[in-house]
Amino acid sequence: MLSRTADHLFWMSRYTERAENTARMLDVNYQTSLLPQSDEMAQSGWQGLLSISELLPNYTKAHGEVKARSVMDFMVQDESNPSSIVSCLGAARENARAVRGTLTTEVWETINQTWLEFNRMLRAGDFERDPAQVFEWVKFRSHLSRGVTLGTMLMDEALYFMRLGTFLERADNTARLVDVKFHALEGDFFGAANEKHQEVDFYYWSAILRSVSGFEIYRRVYRDVIKPERVAELLILRPDMPRSLHASLNEVVENLALVSGEPEGETQRRAGKLRAELQYGRIDEVLAVGLNAYLTQFLDRINELGTRISRDFLVPAPL
């Protein structure tokens, strides 16, 4: 396969996944902002969301003070923000258009229709009326895109590069989601239970689990009250949790092997090493290091892995 074609397929999938994960991060922040909390804590949540997405300088330059509605507008419908949902869906569509002949008609129509319909919804004011419903719609369209891809694409290198992009992006975004919600709260929520806040805590952690479609999975796996350390374990180390870091790295390693002609290459070695650390890691070891430190290191390694994949297989990014 031509590296330019592989590059378009890889980034088409990454942008589709990024749009979904941005919707998930915004949704959990929006839902938790409705819980009883101080103004300082609410603002800290939105600022943390911008920080972990590496968008705080761009936001501050454009909007100044951090406010919930401004942050949501910036991350949903601001075309000057390359990581906004509207920008990601537009980039996914442009990458798909560039390799239209490689995609099935169903995949192209799904991606194109998502872009057109999302812009119609923004013009109609759907986002202002009900942000949560728009976030759910973005997630649904991403699910639909993956389902159509798996159901109609030939199982060859094109599909493997699409899957590689999807799960590399998912690993990055799940780590960011876990980090943004745990970082500021690590000291308060990993200590002894506070009965006064127990009910609020339940809804808080429930919102985080629902943001990754993990609430029912948590109940099935642990059959217990929601505990922060178990939420972290589910989203980091469980290989059977579809959006966990471990499950995402399993897919990255598998698809990397399918597109590579050098099974002993350095890129595969680093991906395998990162997957092995998740496979044999324990949550108490992660917490001993510090969740923020662990996830920051993980994000650095995922970004390095993405750079190596681009260098080995795709169109190299300009320096």
Image (cartoon, rainbow, N blue to C red):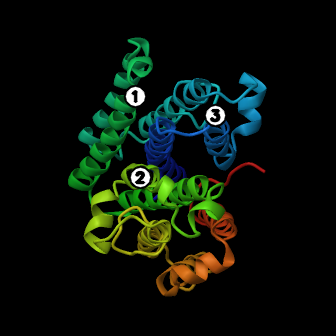
Q: Nearer the viewer, mark 2 or mark 1?
A: 2
Q: Amino acid at mark 2?
A: Glu
Image-quadrant location for residue 231: bottom left
Q: Which mark is residue 6?
A: none
Q: Position of residue 274 (x, y in %)?
A: 57, 78
Q: Is residue 280 left or right of residue 139?
A: right
Q: Position of residue 310 (x, y in %)?
A: 61, 59
Q: Tell me the residue that label 1 is attached to.
A: 115
Q: Amino acid at mark 1?
A: Trp
Nearest to the observer: residue 183 or residue 54: 183
Q: Is residue 28 left or right of residue 70?
A: left
Image-quadrant location for residue 309: bottom right
Q: Is residue 153 left or right of residue 261?
A: left
Q: Residue at x 32, y 58 (%)?
A: 215
- Label 3 vs 1, first from the N-terminus: 3
Q: Secondary structure at mark 3?
A: helix
Q: Secondary structure at mark 1?
A: helix
Q: Residue at x 36, y 51 (%)?
A: 210
> Is residue 98 visible from the viewing direction of this image?
no
Q: Which mark is residue 199?
A: 2
Q: Residue at x 44, y 48 (%)?
A: 17
